[in-house]
Image (spheres, rainbow, N blue to C red):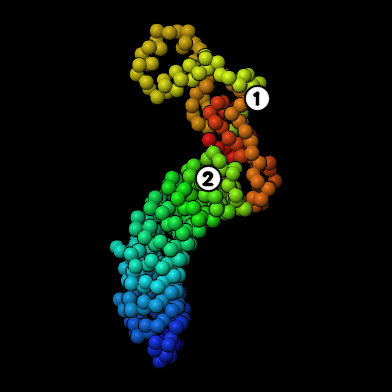
Amino acid sequence: MAERLLIRALKGGINTKIVILNGKNITKMPSALEKLPGLKTLHLQNNQISKVCPEISNLTQLTVLNLGNNLLEEVPEEMKYLTSLKTLHLFRNKIHRFASGVCDGLQSLILLNLNNNQLTWIPQEISRLKNLRCLSINHNQLASIPGELCFLENLSELQLNYNQLVCIPKEIKFLKKLQKLLLARNNIKSLPEGLCDLFNLRILDVAGNVIQIFPSGFQDLKLREFYCEGNPLFLKQPVSAIKQEDVWSLQEISSRFIMNQLAEKNPFLMKAIKWYPQVRSIISQGRKCAICGKFFLTIWLECVEFFPPSKNWKISRNLQLVPLQILICSYKCFYQRNPNIFGIAQV
């Protein structure tokens, strides 16, 4: 069947624009494809192809290539010759690396789908895909992503669900056109402040991570959909206390300075404090901010603010059952005592 379809396509010669050979149990990419220089779309999904034939480099007018669900082990070097390629599907292979130089020729690429592979890293050269708008690398084994990825100035959709990411690079602030960011089911502990500079971001999914604190300014994002279930957000509650004064006392200012310097092992203060028992007595009453980790002396609530998410945000269905609040601590005093309040804490 595959041979008959290919023969029919070859008869069309330069006039053949589309070839579909999905699910034909093909083990080797047909080298005869080089005889179809006018080919625009090539579908070879659901086969057993382990290597790309060198002859594919002749398909310089190809715009769509689907090699999903095959046996490829790398993003092949031959791809760099497909200078007109706009859509590349390589999902459900066994890809664990990018061939050297493969990103050099894919200047027209708009969509790259690498879902369900075995990638543990992304090369810095990914930044050369200047026209890329959608990058999907769900269900891989990525532990980090290079900052260079954030220089894809036309990227509007980034999917990194189900990996092993622990952080997002601060350079994410440069993805000014990003509208959709999916980071569900990773090991991310916090999000960079630069995330709040993504004014075009409309969909954010961070469900199933280990996030406790969101960056300052997070409440100002113009999100339409926000998903955060499965994060340890039920952690912190401020101590009830009466606000003292708007102006800190000299004792509060000096105590905070001394306590924080001692925490940083300042050798001068560590030596000098031994001679001032009264100061030691005062700072012994100090407490530690549960969010930013710095020390304070007087307990009040001037630093704690709760912001409800915008009414325009669509949130997870299970979060609609509780009063979701965004919590800010600006380091004045937020003291952890009872872990029974629900809030998105941010510094």
Estimate the spatial distance between the alpha carbons at disc 2 and disc 1, rounded to whole Å: 30 Å
Q: How many marks?
A: 2
Q: Circle 2 sits on which residue?
A: 196
> Which residue does the image show at 38% across and 70% down from the upper left?
71
* The N terminus - image quarter: bottom left
Q: Position of residue 101 (x, y in %)?
A: 30, 64
- Three-letter code, disc 2: Cys
What label does residue 178 carry, if any? none
Q: Position of residue 246 (x, y in %)?
A: 61, 21
Q: Position of residue 164 (x, y in %)?
A: 44, 50
The crowd level at tag 1 (other Cα within 10 Å; few <14, some 14-19, many 20+) is few
Classify residue 40 by image quadrant: bottom left
**Disc 2 versus disc 1: nearer the observer:** 2
> Which residue does the image show at 44% across and 56% down from the upper left?
153
> Which residue does the image show at 48% across and 50% down from the upper left?
186
Classify residue 99 by image quadrant: bottom left
> Which residue does the image show at 51% across and 55% down from the upper left?
178
Left or right: 97 in relation to 302: left
Name the one closer to the observer, 98 or 303: 303
Q: Identify the secondary structure beneath mark 1.
A: loop
Q: Is residue 110 visible?
A: yes
Q: Circle 1 sits on which residue?
A: 240
Q: Is residue 28 visible?
A: no
Q: Identify the secondary structure beneath mark 2.
A: helix
Mark 2 vs mark 1: which is more N-terminal?
Answer: 2
The crowd level at tag 2 (other Cα within 10 Å; few <14, some 14-19, many 20+) is many
Q: Is residue 13 above or below residue 123?
A: below
Q: Is residue 44 above or below residue 326?
A: below
Name the one closer to the observer, 139 or 125: 125
